Amino acid sequence: MSNNELHQRRLSATPRGVGVMCNFFAQTAENSTITDVEGKQYIDFAAGIAVLNTGHRHPRLVQAIEQQLHAFTHTAYQIVPYESYVALAEKINAAAPIVGPKKTAFFTTGAEAVENAVKIARAHTGRPGVIAFSGGFHGRTYMTMALTGKVAPYKIGFGPFPGSVFHAPYPSELSGISTEDAVKAIDRLFKSDIEATQVAAIIFEPVQGEGGFNVAPPEFVAAIREICNSHGIVMIADEVQSGFARTGKMFAMNHYSHQPDLMTMAKSLAGGMPLSGVVGKAEIMDAPAPGGLGGTYAGNPLAVASAHAVLDVIADEKLCLRAQTLGERLTSRLREITATCPALVEIRGLGSMVAAEFYDPATGEPSAAVAQQVQKRALEQGLLLLTCGQNGNVIRFLYPLTIPDAQFDQALDIIKTATQM
């Protein structure tokens, strides 16, 4: 079967709304390498959109899933519970950078985790309002689309969206938006759109994913914490993309001295198995009544088994340190590239959550075309990259943290040649 034959079948069988980036189809994958149906290999710097921090088919994950497969595959945790769910909740409670007693509930997707975090905050406060930020991405369900601060392609043709959701700008030095600007915008919301005592939660990504890997300044996180403390608002950190060693620490919020009340997680939590979660202060997590949280597949035992293995691999293979080391090597090479690529205007990120932003040197404006050209050139040389950002002009690097050094160096060489304009 050829890639072209499968492409034609895809066009006939599946809707255009499910956008597909690559014109090749995966046959097998191992660690940081994908092999397509025609035998061509690609270095994977996408990792299933930040899902595979532990790589494709890590042997310990495969073993854990196989072992669980021989026990049972599904009972619905709300019907017949199982110890592995409880044990994973205990591990997440211990790891989460939140002060005091904590509890964790598991779901299936990142959007589900965010939806449930909002439900928990509303149940705890008895308030409707939620404040999110421009450039933020929180999912594709109706509530999470409302929270998402990017219209194309996520909101086009899908409105109206749930009410009582408001947006403020997210700090970005390159865009000229300071922490002070963002805080003043929240204050204006309190004056013009919703009173502070009607706001249940403020949700933000400590490192924006789709927004372009903008890193929250420490003073911004401190300001959100102060606002939430002053008005009885629940502070939610969305760590769906930034969690599980990607930033050089278990969670991005480990980089900050001010901590949230709730955190959402998914993606690399289970290394490719569908699993998400919300962890938070026990008294807030206990606000919904029994039956208010859950889902048929929430906390699926196969995914939970994989997540246990993920946490073991992160610890045993020192992937937080590995993320720092690889991130430093990547940013060093990108800084060298700026000498010969005037379109590369900014390199930013934490650990191995690194992005490069491109402008058109002739116009001085953000350029999605330049980013797409780099992406296309890299793919032609066998390197898979993803774009992001409000203007689609940012390339993000999301390689498995388990990638072999030689292959990582090969990818850096491809990036260098792909950025020579």
Image (cartoon, helix red, strand yellow):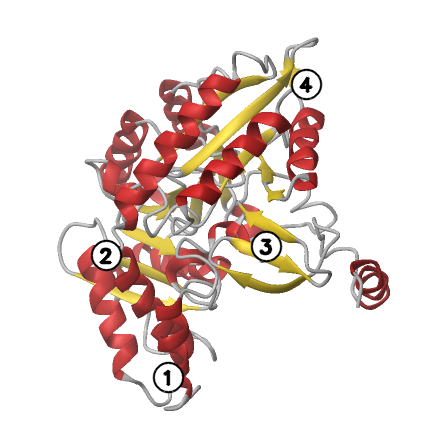
The foreground one among 186 and 46 is 46
SS assignment at label 2: helix
Q: Disc 3 or disc 1, which is closer to the eye?
A: 1
SS assignment at label 3: loop
At label 3, the amino acid type is: Arg
Q: CA distance from mark 3 to mark 1?
A: 31 Å
Query: Are there few (<14), some (14-19), or many (20+) residues within 10 Å of tag 3?
Result: some
Q: Quadrant of the C terminus?
A: top right
Task: Give me the residue at 29% from left, 56% from top.
Answer: 314
SS assignment at label 4: loop
Residue highlighted by disc 3: 140
Whether residue 300 is visible to the viewer of this picture, yes or no, is: no
Q: CA distance from mark 3 to mark 4?
A: 35 Å
At label 2, the amino acid type is: Ala
The x, y position of residue 296, in whole percent, is 47, 80
The x, y position of residue 162, in whole percent, is 57, 52
Q: Earlier in the sequence, mark 3 or mark 1?
A: 1
Taking the image as shown, residue 366 lies to the left or right of residue 246, namely: right
Q: Earlier in the sequence, mark 4 or mark 1?
A: 1
Task: Give me the residue at 75% from left, 52% from top.
Answer: 23
Query: Are there few (<14), some (14-19), or many (20+) residues within 10 Å of tag 2?
Result: some
Query: Are there few (<14), some (14-19), or many (20+) residues within 10 Å of tag 1?
Result: some
Task: Give me the residue at 37% from left, 38% from top.
Answer: 326
Q: Earlier in the sequence, mark 4 or mark 2?
A: 2
Residue highlighted by disc 1: 68
Residues at discs 3 and 1 in contact (Cβ within 8 Å): no
